[in-house]
Image (cartoon, rainbow, N blue to C red):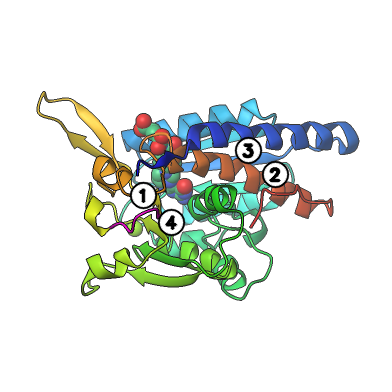
Amino acid sequence: MTAQVIDGKAFAAEVRGKVAEHVARLKEKHDLVPGLAVVLVGEDPASQVYVRSKGKQTTEVGMKSVEHRLDADTSEADLLALIDTLNKDESIHGILVQLPLPKHLNEDLVINSIDPAKDVDGFHISNVGLLGTGQKSMVPCTPLGCLMMLRDHHGSLSGMNAVVIGRSNIVGKPMAQLLLGDSCTVTIAHSRTKDLADVVRRADIVVAAVGRPAMVPGDWIKEGATVIDVGINRIETEDGKTRLVGDVDYESCAARAGAITPVPGGVGPMTIACLLANTLTAACRANGLEEPEGLTA
Ligand SMILES: Nc1nc(=O)c2c([nH]1)NC[C@@H]1CN(c3ccc(C(=O)N[C@@H](CCC(=O)O)C(=O)O)cc3)C=[N+]21
Ligand SMILES: [Mg+2]
């Protein structure tokens, strides 16, 4: 079997199209422009690339985009003061503080100072608790994007065996919650899991989110399974150039899977599209307006 390639880039463009339509309607009917603020602390060049493409896509769908670039040695008090200002700013509906933060800053404290209603990353403890109890929340962008692709490919996920490799607060844990919400039987595997190969071999859905290049070989994949590759690892090739690879060994996994997401062009573009979708959702909720359909969990 050769897997169907799930085109995250094309799907993300579709999602952004839906967001843009809804944003145009908000503007026309309610004179409302959703606003997203991105806060970047320090100079990490890779982060700057993401921030730039987020800003560009935000503007393209008709939203307001604001960027705050702070020095790497910014104090916690100054960062919290900025977040407080953004929390109170009625033209801002979404706030994203780019992670990781420099080591002298307490990430949990900073994230939990964001107004949960504006927490478009879904990382605030209130949103984590709401998701875990099946209540309306802001859902983390990467898992939401993965869920959208899975629902689009399968229709119903009910009863499927899903294995999430990785237990981060950003991807693994919320991904597991979402799959459970769609009635999958969910296993969360991680670096200490025994017989990982056997665990993965039982899975109808494999979500790999560990940040280790090509760590899932094709012979772990059940024939026909769906493979969602969250990894974005920059590796050096023999000719000294760099290349992006995922957490699964693409060629061998694609040879056995029923469907697979590529890297790049899979989960990454969906993450940004879902950030825009979450900003739109937050703007609708803040104004007591109907939420867009199909753009939330
Ligand atoms: N608070 C917070 N929220 C985040 O969502 C967040 C973050 N911090 N810190 C950094 C990571 C990383 N991240 C990516 C999103 C999209 C691509 C993406 O679109 N990647 C392209 C390739 C880009 C390239 O060529 O480098 C792709 O996979 O096709 C990558 C990385 C969001 N992050
Ligand atoms: Mg830190």
Which residue extends farthest left? 238
Q: Which residue is mark 1?
A: 257
Nearest to viewer (mark 1 / mark 3): 1
Q: CA distance from mark 4 to mark 3?
A: 35 Å
What residue type is disc 1 on?
Ala
x 40%, y 31%: residue? 49
Q: Which label's residue is closer to the chain start, 4 or 2?
A: 4
Of the two numbered discs 1 and 2 on the same chain, state the one appearing first in sequence: 1
Q: Position of residue 218 (x, y in %)?
A: 25, 51
Neighbourhood count class around disc 3 (C-alpha, 10 Å): few under 14, some 14–19, many 20 upward: many
Disc 4 vs disc 3: which is toward the camera?
Answer: 3
Earlier-in-chain disc, 4 versus 1: 4
Disc 4 marks a residue whose amino acid type is: Glu
Using the rendered view, name the quadrant where residue 60 is placed.
top right
Image check: 224 left or right of 183?
Answer: left
Q: Closer to the observer: label 3 or label 2?
A: 3
Q: Nearer the viewer, residue 295 or 74?
A: 295
Observer able to see residue 70: no
Q: Which mark is residue 15?
A: 3
**1 or 3: tag closer to the N-terminus:** 3
Is most of the magenta stretch helix, strand or loop? loop
Calculate the distance from the C-alpha at mark 1 to the C-alpha at mark 3.
Answer: 25 Å
Circle 1 packing at 10 Å, graded few (<14), some (14-19), many (20+), is: many
